[in-house]
Image: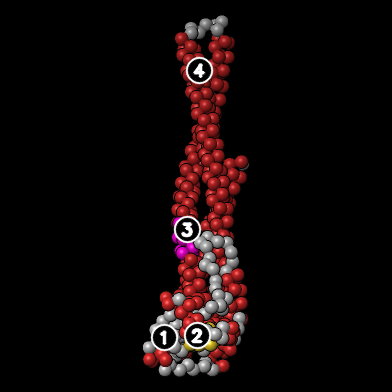
Amino acid sequence: MSLSFTTHDADYVPSRAPLREGSKTSTRDSDQSLSRGQDQSFDPGVLSVNSQSNVVYRKNDALSLPTRSRKSINQTELGPQMLKVASPMDKQQTFETPSTGEIESSRHRRENLAEENARLRLELEALWKQKEDVHDAMDKMLSDLIAAQSGLEEKEAAMNRQLGVVNEQNIQLERLRQTASSLSTELEEKRITRRDIQQSSELEQAVSKLKTEIREKDIQLRERDHILREREVDWKVELHALNEKLSQQQRRCEDAVAELHELQAADTSQAKSEKAKALQYLQELQQLRADISEKKVEDNSQALDQLKASHAAELAELRRISNFFKNNSERLSKQIKEMMAENRVLKESIGAKDRENSR
């Protein structure tokens, strides 16, 4: 059977204002207010109980009005809407004072729950710190990827310039061939005379020398063209492989960012639910302490067991959520380390190609 009672002292039960959503105030202030609420002591000797109406008064209030009965005080000061009609069983209800051991046990349980809440709060702060570190590492990794992409574009531009030089040399070779052909035709068309023998001999020597130079130049250009084509094939293969790796890393980065956003949303909703649970828990502790101090708790041990069981389940859920965030943070850190190692390998490969091309 539950008992209802009222009091005229507004400061008798410590209250806690609800936290605003998005407030940056640390929950440490709420813990301090909780500890102050737990340290407050109540003097049951200053209260008196009216068994006819189940209303609690201060003894000083009753003594200050000797000419008025308690029943008239209840009806005039509190009003009829605040009074509850007691049944015959309520009139015969006797109250048992909780033992000192039960009070101490309840106090120890409250202290343990407060310490557990503080520890979980520290774990959540550590998760926030790890999440910020993940964001910083991902920003650095994206900047490295952009720099690597710029280097690849520069290499491709240099290769295009070299191909342009090769094309120009091929054009010059074709012009030399046309010149040699025209000279040969001119030599064949001219009539050889004795007077022109020396000139013809010199012309033939010049043509022969020119053909030799053309053949040598042709051989050199073909060798260089062959080397450039081989390098072009190698560069295309390497560029394709590097582009594939960069694409994979970009996809992994996008997946990691999406997962971080999901974790951040889940963490925010979890923080809101934890604040609501903490406020509800504080109200239950305040109500229980008020009941113990006023000696109005019925079946105190059963209520304490129920409170312990409910908050043990909440603490288990908080541990599970904390472990979930911790495991995800470790997995993301491992992925970021792997991607950074791959970026270093790509940078070394690009540096080696740069040194080879500079030679």
Vertical placement of 186 versus 341: above or below? Answer: above
Q: Position of residue 221 (x, y in %)?
A: 52, 31
Q: Which residue is mark 1?
A: 2
Q: Spatial distance from mark 1 to mark 4, Cα to Cα? A: 118 Å
Q: Earlier in the sequence, mark 1 or mark 4?
A: 1
| Residue 262 on the magenta span | yes
Vertical placement of 202 versus 298: above or below? Answer: above
Q: Which residue is mark 3?
A: 261
Residue at far front of view: 67
Q: Residue at x 52, y 26 (%)?
A: 168
Q: Spatial distance from mark 3 to mark 1, Cα to Cα? A: 48 Å
Helix, strand or loop status at disc 1: loop
| Residue 145 on the magenta span | no
Tag nearer the camera, 2 or 3: 2
Circles 2, 1 touching at the beta carbon (< 8 Å): no
Q: Which residue is mark 4?
A: 179
Q: Position of residue 333 (x, y in %)?
A: 53, 63
The secondary structure making up most of the magenta span is helix
